[in-house]
Amino acid sequence: MYYSHKNTITKKLFIKAFFIFFASITLIHSTPSSHSTVTDITKFVRTDTTIKFQNKPVLLIFGATYCIPCATLERDIATSKALRTALMQYDVYRIDIDITHSYTIDNTLISDTITYHKEKNWHKSPPIYTTLDTKDLSKAFNIYATPTFIFFDSNAKQLFAYTGALQADSLALTLHFLQNLPPHITNSKNQAPLIAKELQSLFAASHQSKPSF
């Protein structure tokens, strides 16, 4: 069947309008009641294009404009005091993969990524900062879907990455756990699988829904 260019544009506009409508309906039905306390999340999640490491754990959250779980996460941060308390122990940055920006990122946070360590030959004289656009920053961390959470410890070591929705209580528990890793994990050379296993147990013990790690 033949489709004109005009029909193709009309179809794309209809699809985009549908997603905007669906997202707005979802947010309306999940809007907190008038008795809930809503907080400005910019105090806890930065959208800066300069991503710094300041001897503090770091959390990178890769989101997208039409990502409904990303919008839900923002609502959870605004309404969950427990989650905000956990986030205060981290420098948290949100990157929207649908918007092209030029990011300046502390090299200690990406020097271990295989792609850029080899391509830039940084093992000899790594720079303090490097500049990457949104696409290359996503490539450095192998982002293929949103939301994706990248967790670093206070030594700028990437501990764990998770792609998918996380409820407020699950994310808060994860943030606390990663700051207090047991010895058998800190002494391991392959920490991520052990972290995933421990988190599954913790979620089960606290009767939380268990994400698929």
Image (cartoon, rainbow, N blue to C red):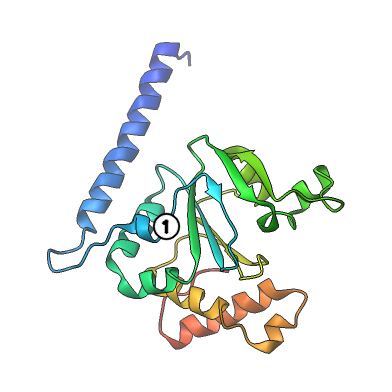
- Residue 10 % position (x, y): 36, 20
The residue lying toward the viewer, choosing from 145 and 54, is 54
The residue lying toward the viewer, choosing from 164 and 107, is 107
Above or below — where is 207 with respect to 133? Answer: below
- Residue 73 % position (x, y): 38, 59
Query: Can you say which quadrant of the picture contains the C terminus?
Result: bottom right
Amino acid type at circle 1 is Val
Q: Is residue 196 left or right of residue 166?
A: right
Query: Label 1: how many residues lie within 10 Å, few (<14), some (14-19) or many (20+)?
Result: many
Question: Which residue is found at the position 40% from the left and 53% from the top?
Answer: 70
Element carrying mark 1: loop
Q: Could you say which quadrant of the image residue 156 lies in?
A: bottom right
Question: Which residue is found at the position 60% from the left and 49% from the top?
Answer: 143
Q: Label 1, on which residue?
A: 45
Furthest-right residue in this view: 124
Q: Could you say which quadrant of the image residue 42 lies in?
A: bottom left
Residue 4 in view here? no
The residue lying toward the viewer, choosing from 73 and 134, is 134
Q: Is residue 211 left or right of residue 81?
A: right
- Residue 75 % position (x, y): 31, 59
Q: Could you say which quadrant of the image residue 208 lies in?
A: bottom left
Question: Which residue is found at the position 69% from the left and 52% from the top?
Answer: 107
